[in-house]
Amino acid sequence: MMTMRWTHLDSPVGRLLLTADDEGALTSLSVPEQKNGRTVQEGWRHDPGPFRAAEEQLAAYFAGELKDFDLELSSAGSEFRERVWTALDTVPYGATTSYGEIAARIGAPRAAVRAVGGAIGANPLLILRPCHRVIGANGALTGYAGGLERKTHLLTLEGVL
């Protein structure tokens, strides 16, 4: 049976909750008041050990010194969500894309844009898997599970805004 490990990290966008599996792969990064974000559960083990690399890389990212994370990530979702999340990983630092462009990248029809938005909203690894880089086709900052204020902060940090 797997024991979920967790730790908190302070950041410019609030206190982050990170979780990892027994192998040390990150399974989630949540922010306070996040829509569908994780909260510490009974039976989880507080253990900052597996998060040292994430802590260092997140500090460098928020300092403007890191553009690409090199961390072991582990997420569980439907085959469709996994395809969407993999497409998110290809959106480079300092760039944005639209929901329709993500749909096209995974070979989904234009009508799947709503489903793509749902998969992006279910991303369990905020910041690390850059769903904040997805904006509306008209350039508007649309939904973000961590809140539009955080999305604005992250895009400003990356030089997009």
Image (cartoon, rainbow, N blue to C red):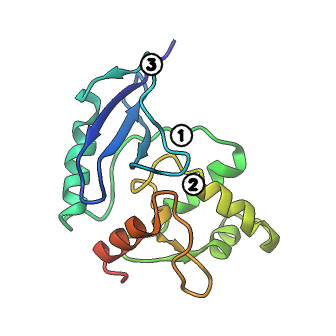
Query: Closer to the N terminus: mark 2 or mark 1?
Result: 1
Crowding at dot 1, Cα within 10 Å, few <14 / some 14-19 / many 20+, comes out as some
In the displayed image of the protein, which residue is found farthest to the bottom? 138
In the image, residue 88 sits, relative to residue 35, either above or below, namely below
Q: Are marks 2 and 1 in contact (CB under 8 Å)?
A: yes
Question: Looking at the image, how many numbered discs can be counted on the residues?
Answer: 3
Residue 36: image x %, image y %?
A: 55, 46
Gap between marks 2 and 3 measured at Cα:
28 Å
Question: Residue placed at 76% from the left, 65% from the top?
Answer: 108
Instruction: Please name the amino acid that badge 2 sits on.
Output: Trp
Q: Nearer the viewer, residue 144 or 57?
A: 144
The residue carrying mark 1 is: 75
Gap between marks 2 and 1 measured at Cα:
9 Å
Question: Residue placed at 33% from the left, 70% from the top?
Answer: 153
What is the number of the mark on residue 45?
A: none
Query: Dot 3: what SS?
Result: loop
The residue carrying mark 2 is: 85
Crowding at dot 2, Cα within 10 Å, few <14 / some 14-19 / many 20+, comes out as many
Q: Is residue 97 left or right of residue 81?
A: left
Question: Residue placed at 53% from the left, 61% from the top?
Answer: 88
Instruction: Please name the amino acid that badge 1 sits on.
Output: Ser
What is the number of the mark on residue 42?
A: 3
Residue 57: image x %, image y %?
A: 24, 51
